[in-house]
Image (tube, rainbow, N blue to C red):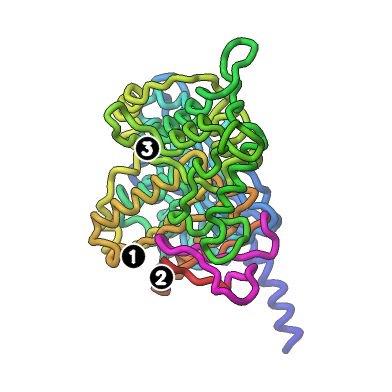
């Protein structure tokens, strides 16, 4: 009997594999009412190492899955280019009934690998059995920041908000067609542009997703660009002049000055969470001021001149218009200000602007720049900072998680805090909003990840799943990272922060509590 069963299993396995392959290949004939759908690829991908690529996972083994690539409504744009919403969806054999839509990055323009690796720790969504979809949001570009598509009306609209909604609907149709049932639970996870998209899902498509994770959302990009320029300009004004008579970019602060700033920030704020560990968890309680570093007399090594202090105070207070109105929040003083590698450089990194090449500008018309940004119709269409009424999303059981690196040099964590507070006020207050939304800050972390003093590996996907499917609201999420091997810390739901209990191994998150 045992031999017979083994033989039957050996025979059934390849037959099942053939059936699965045929089923996947059959997806090439898929049609969807109301749209012109082209399936350009439908093939079984055997289990194996992830190939990486844009938005993909690395160092993990992906399960066998049916990969379907296609395009929605191919057309020729006003500029003669081919447009259409391209997508890729991975349909695993071990499907759990869960669906994840993966957010984009930059200006999108390419279809990322559908693995669901963002904010998923070391286990991407696809390896867990999620069906995962990605999209280029309606255009093709190079380098991630090719904005030429914005000249085409529909391409701009697709990027700003239409494409993610259409892909969500189609992906669920594909899943139902392939598995014979709809997803039991749907999730959206993204960072930066993907974080903005995640917010839009709660705002414009409030019934589409059960759990949404928005990392470092690219809210008010024009305003954040204005703010980072204001920091560069403030420092250029006190920088030494080069042979051409123009300020030397990055010259306002020496390497020694930068080291002294970070050292002083740590001296003033590091121990506020109960342990000196090179990280600042009491972010909002950190009362560092550049004046803490002012030299008592002439400029010397290890302290700052009066003009350097003034420039830093102006820079980090955030840009204001001529009437004193805050145009964009300032930035936190944190340990990642001088970071140079692994992504966008820190706000005080040598000679560079966080969002572009070095500039020697010493003047900035904030009123004019703000007026231009505020009247930009494209920005207004896709902006996620203004809409704060989420009662439809919350009333259907939706859960919204934010996370943001405190040292993010592009989008200030203070702006995400501001949105969270405004959204809280508009949706019934703190107690009510904590039933469906939490915000987590990651000290030392740059834009979406990275940082020489950061713990930037965390699993907000599991956090969202547990909240949606088990009604387990997150008070904290454990973070680890390459910067501190062997260290773990809880990232606490804002406004609480991690604080050492005073005993036990200070490298272990178990010995920390979340306190206001």
Which quadrant, please, contains the C terminus?
A: bottom left
Which disc number belongs to residue 459? Answer: none
Left/right placement of residue 476 relative to residue 434 reads: right
Q: Is 182 in the magenta?
A: no
Q: CA distance from mark 1 to mark 2?
A: 8 Å
Residue 322 drawn above or below residue 477:
above
Q: At which x and y percent is residue 100?
A: 47, 57
Residue of label 1: 434
Dot label at residue 473: 2
Q: Of 55 and 376, which appears nearest the observer?
A: 376
Secondary structure beneath disc 1? Answer: loop
Q: Work out whether 319 lies above or below 476.
A: above
Q: Position of residue 338 (x, y in %)?
A: 61, 40
Q: Residue at x 34, y 53 (%)?
A: 420
| In magenta stretch: residue 505 | yes
Outermost residue, front direction?
297
Residue with the mark numbered 3: 328
- Is there CB contact under 8 Å for labels 1 and 2? yes
What range of the chain is rendered magenta? 483-509
Which callout, 3 or 1, points at the residue further toward the start of the chain?
3
Q: Which is more foreground, mark 3 or mark 1?
A: 3
Image quarter for residue 230? top left
Q: Residues within 10 Å of mark 1 (few under 14, many from 20)?
A: some
């Amino acid at each position: 009997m045992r031999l017979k069963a083994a033989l039957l299993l050996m025979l059934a396995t390849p037959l099942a594999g053939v059936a699965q392959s045929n089923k996947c290949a059959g997806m090439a004939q898929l049609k969807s009412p109301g749209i012109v759908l082209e399936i350009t690829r439908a093939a079984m991908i055997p289990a194996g190492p992830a190939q990486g690529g844009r938005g993909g996972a690395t160092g993990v083994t992906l399960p066998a899955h049916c990969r379907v690539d296609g395009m929605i409504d191919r057309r020729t744009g006003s500029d003669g280019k081919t447009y259409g919403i391209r997508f890729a969806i991975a349909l695993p054999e071990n499907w759990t009934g869960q669906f994840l839509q993966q957010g984009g990055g930059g200006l999108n323009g390419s279809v990322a690998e559908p693995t669901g690796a963002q904010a998923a720790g070391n286990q991407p969504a696809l390896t867990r059995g999620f069906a995962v979809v990605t999209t280029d949001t309606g255009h093709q570009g190079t380098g991630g920041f090719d904005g030429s598509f914005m000249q085409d009306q529909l391409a701009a609209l697709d990027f700003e908000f239409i494409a993610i909604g259409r892909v969500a609907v189609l992906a669920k149709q594909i899943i139902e067609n392939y598995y014979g049932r709809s997803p039991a639970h749907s999730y959206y996870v993204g960072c930066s542009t993907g974080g903005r998209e995640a917010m839009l899902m709660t705002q414009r498509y409030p019934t589409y997703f059960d759990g949404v994770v928005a990392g470092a959302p690219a809210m008010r990009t024009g305003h954040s660009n204005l703010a980072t320029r204001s920091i560069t300009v403030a420092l250029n004004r006190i920088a030494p002049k080069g042979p051409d008579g123009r300020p030397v970019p990055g010259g306002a602060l020496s390497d020694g000055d930068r080291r002294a700033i970070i050292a002083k920030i740590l001296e003033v704020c590091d121990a506020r969470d109960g342990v000196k560990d090179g990280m600042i968890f009491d972010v909002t309680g950190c009362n560092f001021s550049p004046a803490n570093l002012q030299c008592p007399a002439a400029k010397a090594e290890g302290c700052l001149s009066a003009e350097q202090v003034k420039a830093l105070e102006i820079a980090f207070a955030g840009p204001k218009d001529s009437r004193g109105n805050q145009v964009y929040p300032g930035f936190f003083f944190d340990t990642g200000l001088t970071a140079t590698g692994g992504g966008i450089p820190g706000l005080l990194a040598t000679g560079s602007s966080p969002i572009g090449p070095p500039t020697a500008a010493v003047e900035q018309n904030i009123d004019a720049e703000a007026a231009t940004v505020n009247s930009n119709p494209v920005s207004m269409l896709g902006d996620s900072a203004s809409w704060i009424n989420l009662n439809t999303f919350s009333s259907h059981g939706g859960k919204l998680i934010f996370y943001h690196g405190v040292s993010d040099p592009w989008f200030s964590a203070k702006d995400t805090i501001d949105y969270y507070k405004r959204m809280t006020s508009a949706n019934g207050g703190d107690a009510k909003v904590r039933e469906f939304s939490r915000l987590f800050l990651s000290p030392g972390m740059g834009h979406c990840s990275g940082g020489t003093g950061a713990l930037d590996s965390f699993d907000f996907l599991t956090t969202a799943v547990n909240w949606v499917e088990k009604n387990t609201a997150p008070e904290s999420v454990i973070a680890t990272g390459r910067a501190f091997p062997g260290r773990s810390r809880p990232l606490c739901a804002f406004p609480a922060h991690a604080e050492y209990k005073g005993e036990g191994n200070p490298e272990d998150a178990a010995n920390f509590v979340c306190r206001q």
